Structures are given as C-alpha cells and as structure tokens.
Image (cartoon, rainbow, N blue to C red):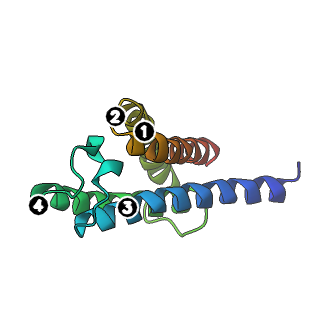
Amino acid sequence: MYSYQKERIEKMISMLGASIFGIATIIYILLALGFPLGEYAMGGKYKVMPGKFRIACGISVIIQLFAIIIILQTGGILPTWFSLNTTRMICYFFAIYLSLNSILNVLSSSKKEKYVVTPLSVLSAICFWITAIKA
C-alpha cells in the first residue's frame, strides 16, 4: 500500500473516532440540559438526570471535547498543542478509558445503554487505539 493511502486511512480512522465520540458528546450535552435521555448513560437509573448528575454530564462534555481534539491531533488532522508523543500518550489514555467504559456499558442494567451506547464506545475505543498506535 502506498504511504499516502496508508496516511489517508489513518486520518479517516481518527475522524471516524472523533465523529462517533461526538455522538456521545451530543447525548451528554442533551443530558446536561435536562432532556429525558438518562437511560443512555450512567447505568440508566434516571430518565432525566438530577441536578448533580447534569453538572457531571457538563464536565464530561468538556472532557469529551478534549478527547475529540486529541484524536484529531494525534491523527494529523489538527495541529498539536503538545508534542506528538504527549498527544499520543493522551490518546492511549482515552483508548484505555473507552475500553473500560465499554465493559461497564455491557454490564449496565439499561438496555438502551447496553445496546446503543456500548457499540459506540467500542468503536471509539478501537479508533483511539489505532490512532495512538499508528501515530
């Protein structure tokens, strides 16, 4: 495979990971705003997140946006804020986090979280792993 094709595929994987993780970010924005989507997050215990959980969702949004920027920087889509090695290590951190998150989602008592959010989390984790390894 030509190097430009390989580089293009790697960039597409990082964009895919950012896009999929962006879906989770949108869900968390809506949760923070009080939309009745609680069955898709945090074990599905609440239909509408209580105040403290809305704040947690808002903080999660900031972290998720940072993760999206990191995968795009590691994938060479955006200029890096840190050295490539640092950005790559942060990308590994999010890959590990998403892998563990996927396990917790599978164990969720909420069917919506289990069957909708888990595949998104798994695909995001795979994209973060590939991007971090190939950087």
Give the distance between the C-alpha atoms of the residues marked 2 and 1, in whole angstroms.
6 Å
Q: As shown in the figure, which amino acid type bears the numbered disc 2?
A: Ser
Q: Do the residues labelled 2 and 1 touch (CB within 8 Å)?
A: yes
Residue located beneath label 3 in the image: 27
Whether residue 83 appears in this view of the structure is no
- SS for tag 4? helix
Residue located beneath label 1 in the image: 114
Q: From the viewer's perspective, is residue 13 above or below residue 61? A: above
The residue lying furthest to the right in this view is 1
Please report whichever mark, 3 or 1, sits nearer to the chain's N-terminal start: 3
Q: Which residue is drawn at 11% across and 56% down?
A: 52
Please report whichever mark, 4 or 1, sits nearer to the chain's N-terminal start: 4
Q: Are marks 4 and 1 in contact (CB under 8 Å)?
A: no
Mark 3 surroundings: few (<14), some (14-19) or many (≥20) residues within 10 A: many
Give the distance between the C-alpha atoms of the residues marked 3 and 4, in whole angstroms.
16 Å
Q: Residue at x 46, y 53 (%)?
A: 87
In percent of width and height, residue 6 lies at: 78, 52
Residue nearest the viewer, comparing 61 with 72: 61
Residue nearest the viewer, comparing 71 with 126: 126
- SS for tag 2? loop
Give the distance between the C-alpha atoms of the residues marked 3 and 1, in whole angstroms.
15 Å
Q: As shown in the figure, which amino acid type bears the numbered disc 1?
A: Lys
Q: As shown in the figure, which amino acid type bears the numbered disc 4?
A: Gly
Please report whichever mark, 3 or 4, sits nearer to the chain's N-terminal start: 3
